């Protein structure tokens, strides 16, 4: 049934006010009126409705108004919470976060090396049980959960299609399992997509057409935005640059194919190549490789430059197909790789069409596992509270009736 025009206007006003308060941290009634160009009675009505639902709370007064002190309103940090959980090859990170962005719970567990699907599921639910129990002990309401997975997923149907690094972890309807166990909504996404939620707002306002590329220890992840909106693909697994094949006869990737970008440009692949060339003095950690690189080891430098050449080649060909204005390379905070960043840019400029050279800008940023889980928790609130295409008063009311 189509909504009445008045209902649409009310919902839009509510969403606009919520997002204004979210962006500014706290707002007065007058500030909401002037920013949103809606009447004072309308603002008062919306604020009262949201206060009744513990979405908005009073947060003190603004005293320098020249007259009566003006009441400030902010997102209520006390009741609505989301859970973000990120799975990577070696560990699981989980965060519980309040509506105003305060992290209330954080934990990271390292998994055993040789996992099968059953043991992985056990690890996952142990971590979720701990986070859910923590929130329930504090009488908090859980809006939902976002799970970020590596490998191949079917996001809309909530299915792990293939987590290659875990034995027999295939075709598992993980979202159905989570919802049946806990009774709240859950979302499955690629873990790189959820990580970029932390960085997207920083770049997308100026560059709505942005490609984020995550340079991780064992893989290359990516997320593509067009007109400020994530290009997700049919299965929620779009822009999988790490498995672009560069050499059909190249080294075998963990995905089962050969010559993937991950086999040449991930940090672990560089370490592997170093040990192949310097078999008399092998090293066993990425940190040791980075230390040698920082001390100017010529073999390390050559390997990193070759990795940048491959990465720049793939990005140049991606830019030829997609209307990209910005490419952001995200590096793990543990490792600074200015040589890889510059080698990638140099390679991109070598392989890009002359007619479009200079259109795409490059930036670099850093990430951590903690940020990825926070990005997942943010994604829940965006999907169920702040986004126009998802939010309705009925959805929010349902949260309070559960």
Image (cartoon, rainbow, N blue to C red):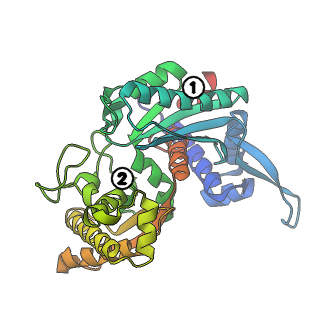
Q: Quadrant of residue 159?
A: top left
Find residue 230 and report its horizontal and vertical position in percent: 37, 51
Q: Secondary structure at mark 1?
A: helix
Which residue is the site of mark 1?
398
Q: Which mark is residue 83?
A: none
Q: Residues within 10 Å of mark 2 (few under 14, many from 20)?
A: some
Find residue 253 and report its horizontal and vertical position in percent: 23, 49
Q: Residues within 10 Å of mark 1 (few under 14, many from 20)?
A: few
Q: Nearer the N terminus, badge 1 or badge 2? A: 2
Residue depicted at x 34% and y 53%: 219
Query: Which residue is most to the front?
Result: 280
Which residue is the site of mark 2?
218
In this view, the residue in front, 232 or 342, is: 342
**Whether residue 369 is situated above or below residue 366 in the rendered picture:** above
Residue depicted at x 39% and y 58%: 214
Q: Secondary structure at mark 2?
A: loop
Find residue 200 and report its horizontal and vertical position in percent: 46, 58
Residue depicted at x 40% and y 27%: 174
């Amino acid at each position: 049934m189509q909504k009445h025009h008045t209902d649409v206007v009310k919902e839009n006003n509510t969403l606009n006010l919520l997002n204004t308060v979210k962006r500014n941290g706290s707002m007065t009634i007058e500030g909401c009126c002037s920013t949103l160009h809606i009447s004072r009675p309308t603002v008062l009505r919306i604020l009262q409705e949201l206060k009744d639902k513990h979405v908005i709370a009073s947060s003190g007064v603004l005293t320098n108004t020249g007259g009566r002190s003006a009441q400030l309103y902010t997102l209520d940090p006390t009741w609505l919470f989301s859970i973000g959980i990120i799975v990577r090859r070696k560990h699981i990170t989980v965060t519980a976060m309040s509506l105003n962005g305060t992290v209330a719970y954080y934990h990271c567990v390292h998994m055993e090396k040789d996992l099968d699907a059953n043991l992985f599921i056990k690890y996952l639910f142990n971590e979720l049980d701990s986070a859910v129990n923590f929130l329930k002990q504090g009488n908090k309401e859980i809006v939902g959960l976002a799970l970020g997975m590596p490998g191949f997923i079917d996001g809309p149907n909530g299915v792990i299609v293939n987590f290659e690094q875990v034995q027999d972890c295939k075709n598992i309807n993980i979202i159905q399992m989570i919802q049946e166990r806990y009774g709240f909504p859950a979302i499955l996404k690629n873990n790189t997509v959820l990580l970029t939620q932390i960085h997207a707002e920083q770049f997308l306002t100026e560059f709505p057409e942005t490609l984020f590329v995550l340079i991780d220890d064992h893989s290359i992840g990516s997320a593509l935005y067009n007109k400020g909106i994530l290009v997700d693909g049919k299965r929620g697994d779009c822009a999988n640059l790490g498995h672009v094949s560069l050499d059909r006869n190249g080294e075998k990737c963990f995905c089962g194919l050969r010559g993937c970008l991950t086999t040449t440009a991930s940090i672990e692949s560089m370490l592997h190549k170093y040990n192949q060339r310097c078999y008399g003095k092998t090293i066993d950690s990425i940190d040791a490789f980075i230390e040698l690189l920082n001390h100017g080891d010529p073999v390390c430098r050559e390997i990193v430059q070759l990795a940048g050449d491959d990465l720049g080649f793939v990005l140049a060909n991606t830019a030829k197909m997609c209307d990209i204005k910005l490419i952001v390379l995200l590096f793990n905070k543990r490792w600074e790789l200015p040589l890889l960043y510059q080698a990638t840019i140099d390679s991109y400029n070598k392989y890009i069409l002359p007619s479009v050279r200079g259109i795409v800008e490059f930036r670099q940023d850093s990430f951590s596992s903690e940020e990825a889980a926070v990005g997942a928790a943010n994604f829940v609130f965006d999907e169920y509270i702040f986004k126009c295409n998802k939010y309705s008063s009925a959805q929010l009311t349902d949260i309070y009736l559960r």
